[in-house]
Image (cartoon, rainbow, N blue to C red):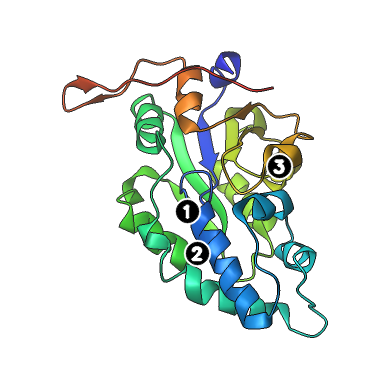
């Protein structure tokens, strides 16, 4: 990872499950939809073992009959619960230290998310992170359909060679997007997919942002004159 960091000039971050610790809320939102459409509830473990893109496939795997209930209705039910509460989710441990360290060392930052862009911006603002990001890219509708298309637009805006960009995410889909765009990638195993689903990824894997901080080649963040510890350097391959 340290060799990789020597090339990186811009880090693109997924939001849900990567910077934002919203897995528990997502499970509750899915179960809200399950209750509405009479589908068996899921546990956190079941959710993380099944989560995938496209999102319609994920819901079908949970038992939603999308030939009888339109996918748009299922998503509306989920979002009616999730969007009202997402601003209260915590950031993942080490998120602000990670962003500070990158920014203080001249690394650009952007967001690429499958979230509905207005909700995404509102949540980023609620967390006090608006000033960190050059670009915030979310979807134009609420059905999580084309994250890759948004990634292509972002790639053109950045105007950098692929090896100068690192995408940090938490799903196999994030790895697929990075590969399609020619970017490097790194995956957190604490997010919306479990380690079994992530096992096929060839990208470096870390258990969380605090561990990823240990791979950075720069000095610890100084905040208000105090050095912030960067954590350990545990990396999974």
Q: Where is residue 132 in the image (x, y as percent from the top left)?
A: 36, 43
**Regarding mark 2 in the picture, which secondary structure is present there?**
helix
Residue 105 location, quadrant: top left
210 relative position to 172: left or right: left
**Mark found first going from the N terminus, 3 or 2:** 2
Looking at the picture, does residue 94 appear above or below residue 82?
above
Using the numbered discs, state the Cα–Cα distance from disc 1 to disc 3 in whole angstroms: 17 Å
Q: Where is residue 112 in the image (x, y as percent from the top left)?
A: 55, 50
Q: Position of residue 88 (x, y in %)?
A: 36, 59
Residue 77 location, quadrant: bottom right
Mark 1 Cα within 10 Å, few/some/many (few <14, many 20+)? many
| In the image, farthest residue toward the right | 67
Tell which of 200 and 103 is nearer to you.
200
Tell which of 160 and 56 is nearer to you.
56
| In the image, farthest residue toward the left | 225
**Mark found first going from the N terminus, 2 or 1:** 2
Which residue is the site of mark 2?
Answer: 117
Q: Position of residue 26 (x, y in %)?
A: 55, 60
Contact? badges 1 and 3 (CB < 8 Å):
no
Q: For the residues carrying marks 3 and 2, which lies nearer the camera in this image?
A: 2
**Regarding mark 1 in the picture, which secondary structure is present there?**
strand
Tell which of 78 and 13 is nearer to you.
78
136 relative position to 202: left or right: left
> Residue drawn 54% across and 67% down?
29
Using the numbered discs, state the Cα–Cα distance from disc 2 to disc 1 in whole angstroms: 8 Å
Looking at the picture, does residue 50 appear above or below residue 132?
below
Which residue is the site of mark 1?
Answer: 136
Give residue 113's mark. Answer: none
Give residue 181's mark. Answer: 3
């Amino acid at each position: 990872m340290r060799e990789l960091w020597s090339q990186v000039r811009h880090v693109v971050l997924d939001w849900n499950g990567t910077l934002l610790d919203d897995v528990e809320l997502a499970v509750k939102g899915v179960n809200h939809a399950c209750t509405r459409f009479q589908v068996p509830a899921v546990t956190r473990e079941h959710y993380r073992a099944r989560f995938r893109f496209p999102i319609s496939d994920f819901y079908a795997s949970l038992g939603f009959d999308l030939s009888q209930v339109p996918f748009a209705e299922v998503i509306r039910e989920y979002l009616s619960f999730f969007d009202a509460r997402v601003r209260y989710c915590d950031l993942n441990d080490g998120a602000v230290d990670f962003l500070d360290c990158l920014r203080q060392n001249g690394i650009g930052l952007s967001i690429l998310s499958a979230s509905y862009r207005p909700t995404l911006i509102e949540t980023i603002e609620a967390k006090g992170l608006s000033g960190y990001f050059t670009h915030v890219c979310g979807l134009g509708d609420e059905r999580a359909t084309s994250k890759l298309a948004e990634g292509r637009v972002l790639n053109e805006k950045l105007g950098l060679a692929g090896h100068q960009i690192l995408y940090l995410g938490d799903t196999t889909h994030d790895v697929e997007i990075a590969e399609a765009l020619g970017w490097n990638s790194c995956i957190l195993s604490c997010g919306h997919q479990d380690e079994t689903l992530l096992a096929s990824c060839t990208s470096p894997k870390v258990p969380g942002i605090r561990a990823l901080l240990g791979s950075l080649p720069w000095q610890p963040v100084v905040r208000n004159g105090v050095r912030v510890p960067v954590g350990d350097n545990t990396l999974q391959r």
